[in-house]
Image: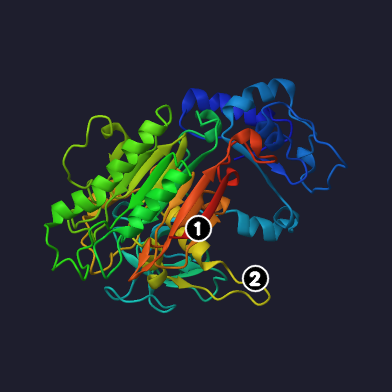
Amino acid sequence: LVPTGGGGMAGGCCLARDAASPQTQVWAIEPEGYDDHRTSLARGERTPLSGTPATTICDALQANAPGHVTFAINSGGLAGAAAGGGAAAEASPTEGGEEAEWPPVAGVVAAGPEAATFVGRVCSDSEGGKLNPQSVWLEGSRSSSGACRARLDLSECAEYALFPGQVVAVRGVNLLGHTIRASRVLCGSPPPNAVPPSEREISPEPFNVITATGPFTCSDDLSFAPLDALLEQATSRRALALVLVGPFVEADHPALAAAEVGYEDLFEQRVMLKVEAFLAAAAEAYPHAPPHVVLVPSPRDVLASPVYPQPPLPRRRSPEQIAPLLHLAPNPAAIDVGGVRIAVGSLDALLMIGSAELASAPQPGAPRPDRLLRLASHVLQQRSFLPLLPPPADLPVDMAHNFVAGAIDTRPDILLLPSQLAPFAKVLPDAAGGALCVNAGRLTRNAAGGNYATLSVHPRAQVDGARTSDIAPRVAVEIAKI
């Protein structure tokens, strides 16, 4: 993160990065009101500021435009630019320095009177116990702390949101080695953006993505009529992609025991044949831009592996003309639609984290925090669809495999988090990755229809004021009843 005026130091950092550490991102940080690099990067050309100059205490960074030579380097070398300052920059040097600078990292049981940064995993003082302000502990790594634990005293911490398994950095003092008196908690950082949207080939035409989460039939029959209605919507809206998240044949469906066909035949006849018929008709109608269908399993699927993370659903081979359009994905999965990266998992991560979370009360006079937004932010900040440790008792989890297959390695543009909680579409804060998070709900609720979501992605040229690196401002989300 490089303080930036004309861009000389940022350009030098980009050149040094290219030689020494090509994978490292360099970001330009500018004062509010002097965000000439952010404006220029968004427009793709050197753009001077217009209007009355702003007032800022960052008086060494008051550049009205990027330098000619430096912007030629920074336009291709910077990962992005952000504006900061305001109240944080204008705080007194003592106050600003105390909060802005993090002290050196120490093991969680390292005793001393000086403030330190302690990094570890949140846990409870009892196995499986629910967190409360007196039961929160921080477990250090084997390498830095010998896997030892220290209690977290949160009485002086104004804001926190913690759950078991969460990896955090804590600023505080551990005077005697057994209790960390915390003053601030940092809840992780989102995964890196491997290839920024500005460098990807994103579809120049608008397109629709429809997503729905099972069950795909009502609880009183096995007709899968809601799936039929969903496929009709995908046809009428000319969806480029249909992301279907299990369960497809639910293991505890009330009518399953009395079914006249086996589980495999039920899945083939009531799910796959319908999907294949939809693809065949759409491919014939639109041969140059046929839709794709992605199926993601659920631990509740009777045919899927019950252990999370899950491999793709097993099935017979599709007809040759349809096979390239039908994708059986693992759970979780990362997919690319028209250059837009979508991460999706079938676990109800929002409900799981929300049930285990311990959050501070809002400060007097402060606005009430958006709980759903905070729960969704945890997933990207922890870089995992299942960051809870221990996981829920009723969910079989291969923990070693979860650290690999369950991880979110690169930042998605859209994060699909199906949940029993209220459906929503929200843009996560920049500190959580800035992705668009969507919970479409369930396609059926007992014997009635539920919800699905249509995501309409618009071309970059049709959205004014959006930064080149942003996908979320170009997506319109409609959550509708089936």
Task: Say which label, 2 or 1, has the lower sequence index.
Answer: 2
Whether residue 403 sits left or right of residue 71 in the image: it is left
Q: Position of residue 40 (x, y in %)?
A: 70, 32
Q: Nearer the viewer, residue 43 or 79?
A: 43
Give 176 or 230, whichever is nearer the viewer. 230
Towards the viewer: 209 or 161: 209
The residue pinned by badge 2 equals 367
Q: Quadrant of the N terminus?
A: top right
| Horizontal relation, residue 48 to residue 269: left or right | right
Dot 1, how many residues are within 10 Å of its Cα: few (below 14), some (14-19), or many (20+)?
A: many
Q: Which mark is residue 479?
A: 1
Query: Where residue 257 sits: x, y (%)?
Result: 13, 68
Q: Position of residue 323 (x, y in %)?
A: 26, 34
Q: Where in the figure is residue 18, as x and y percent of width and height?
A: 51, 24
Disc 2/disc 1 C-alpha distance (Å): 26 Å
- Write the residue at 14% across / 64% down: 259
Left-right relation of 250 to 25: left
